[in-house]
Amino acid sequence: MDSLETNETTALEQSAEKEVTGQSVPQDVQTTPEDTPEVEEPTAETPAESEPTPEPETESIPVPEAEGETEAENEGEEEEGTETPATLTKEEVVARIKEIASGEDAGEKSEVDHLKVLFYKYHNAEMQEAFRTFIESGGEADKFIPQIDPTEPEFRAAMQIIRERRAAMQEALEQQKQDNLKRKLAILERIQQLAATPEEANQAFSEFKSLQNEWKEIKAVPAERATELWKNYQLYVEKFYDLLKLGHELRDYDFRKNLEIKTRLCEQAEALADVPDVIQAFNQLQGLHQEWKETGPVAKNLRDEIWDRFKAASTVINKRHQAHFENLKAREEENLAAKTALCEELEAIGTDSLKSFADWESITQKIIDLQARWKTIGYAPQKMNNQIFERFRKGCDQFFAQKSEFFQRLKEELNVNLARKKELVEKAEALRESTDWRRTGDTLVQLQKQWKEIGAVPRKYSEALWKRFVSACDQFFEAKQAATAGQREEENANLGQKRDIIEQLKALTQEGTENVLQQVRALQQKWGEVGHVPFRDKDKLYKEYREICDKLYDSLGAEQAKRRLNNFRSNLAQKFEKEAGGLTAERNRMMRAYEKMRDELKTYENNLGFLTSSSKKGNSLVDTMKKKVDKLRDELNLLAEKIKAVDEQMKNEDKEAPQE
């Protein structure tokens, strides 16, 4: 028998392994065939033992997970393709799984898997409904805690019993396969002995037929030995018939009956080419191959002919089966590419720039749209299906976790702001009836500045709190205005002086830069010496004054920066010509200063992003910080130009240096 062993892995070997071990390929399960060469004995090609793992039912629901939920969902992910209609209620599903667990066998795998899918569909649907009810009743998403499902422990316990029973049955089956292997090896050894000489073959024909019948009755053996056993069996049987000299009529009758059977098998195999269901045709062909293997030989001159006919019919079915799974594999690869693109689109979404409720809701809608698109895409290849799903789910989970953290921080910040503004309101209300006009007025103005610096408060308190604060301030200033009516003429005169100063500042914007800075400072000093203006004009007038001053200083700053750069360039060569490596040292110093200033600018820009204005009149702290950022940016640009000038000077010196 050692001389008959082969290293070839063929479609025949795969089929024989499946048949002997009692395995079959369900018609409704997606599989991927392996490319295998054809040899003498064709058979229905057995797909690789891989099935795409169905996707979870609740793959991306933004609902807080309860303890144990992940495991429950994973259990519900198996065998989603089951075609049994979901006509059972949740209670009936639990009752049926307990009934199976209380029986003696492990039940049909397809039914058990379908019951598992149904249970977790119901379970997850109840959880989502509870979450929606919680939110509609005014609850907060991050505080939702799912209730324990009382039927889940019963369901899990029954499933555990079934799994343990199935494992025990599998262990018993493996032991039975080993026993069957020993019996078949003994039969092979006896047939080999009978086929040793023509005399023994003629004398033991009856024993030979008994051995054949016993061989057919023995079923599954270990898959790795199935092909070897079958090939040896065929070899020894044919050798026995070839040596058989006595009982020609009996032998010829046996040949004719075998020919009739194999002719029928050829016709049935040829008819399978017209079966529209490829999987069904493939499974039926496996049965025909099993019957062919159990049928004895035909006359020697007909063996090749009948075999070639059966082989040709099998090849047609095999090619259809192969094409079916190749198309399925191509679709799965397309699905993987589509899901990978969704993952990349999800991972490209950043949250650092999301600063408001509207920003987060806009991105949340995008995430929900991606989840909806995900559900329209079919399975990916099995080896990548779980991996790509976990990648997508991880991205969704991270986003919703960050969203929850943002709103928690925002809530805390709003509550802090609310407490601070309530304190300001109470102070303003305590001063509303004061007659110390100057001191109280300054205090209220300071309170107003503090109000602007404080961020937003919860919307339901914002309007009422603002009205209280404004009302207290207005009450005081109206009383002050009525009591100080005699001061109006003086304030109106001051208003005229300040408007005249603004006009003079505007005129300076049309002039050159010579002595403009001294004139601006003189006008600013004069502005500070002018007394109060009418309250209603104060903010508008100061805004106009501030804008023209900023414009002048911006213009003067640009000119000064330009002059500073020109002076730096003109003095660059003289300043460092006597120092060895002076330019390099200066450049290194400026680079360190540049990096330090750049980090400082980033810090200011980040801090500026967290500040928001809570008043229509603007936020003075934000304005001050913006000016600081603009000034730093200008200084940074000037320093970059100086570094560039040093680089140019060093380059010129290299060109002028004598060549060795």
Image (cartoon, rainbow, N blue to C red):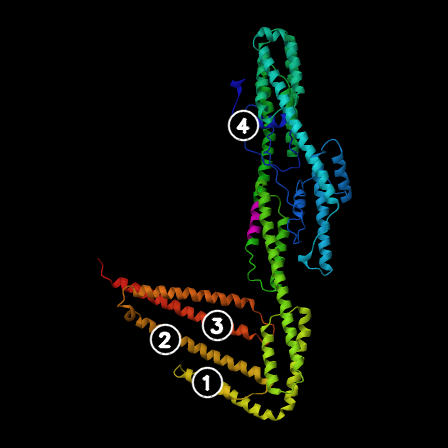
**Residue type indicated by callout 4:** Thr
Name the mark nearer the viewer: 3 or 2: 3
Residue 503 in sight here: yes
Q: In this view of the protein, which residue sits in the foreground, 180 or 1?
A: 180
Residue 270: image x %, image y %? Answer: 63, 27
Name the mark nearer the viewer: 1 or 2: 2
Task: Please tell me how crowded label 3 is: few (under 14), some (14-19), or many (20+) other residues with Cα within 10 Å.
Answer: some
Q: CA distance from mark 3 to mark 2?
A: 22 Å
Task: Please tell me how crowded label 2 is: few (under 14), some (14-19), or many (20+) other residues with Cα within 10 Å.
Answer: few
Question: Image quadrant of residue 332?
Answer: top right
- Which residue position holds label 3? 628
Q: In this view of the protein, which residue sits in the foreground, 238 or 170?
A: 170
Seen at 53% across and 21% down, the residue is 5
Q: Earlier in the sequence, mark 3 or mark 2?
A: 2
Q: Tell me the SS state at disc 4.
A: loop
Name the mark nearer the viewer: 3 or 1: 3
Q: In this view of the protein, which residue sits in the foreground, 11 or 48?
A: 48
- Which residue position holds label 2? 563
Residue 242: image x %, image y %? Answer: 58, 11
Residue 539: image x %, image y %? Answer: 57, 82
Q: Earlier in the sequence, mark 3 or mark 1?
A: 1
Question: If the image is split into quadrants, where does the C terminus sit?
Answer: bottom left
Q: CA distance from mark 4 to mark 2?
A: 85 Å
Q: CA distance from mark 3 to mark 4?
A: 76 Å
Residue 351: image x %, image y %? Answer: 57, 59
Task: Please tell me how crowded label 4 is: few (under 14), some (14-19), or many (20+) other residues with Cα within 10 Å.
Answer: few
Query: What secondary structure is the magenta-colored segment mainly?
Result: helix
- Which residue position holds label 1? 507
Highlighted magenta segment, given as a residue range: 336-344
Q: Tell me the SS state at disc 2.
A: helix
- Which residue position holds label 4? 9
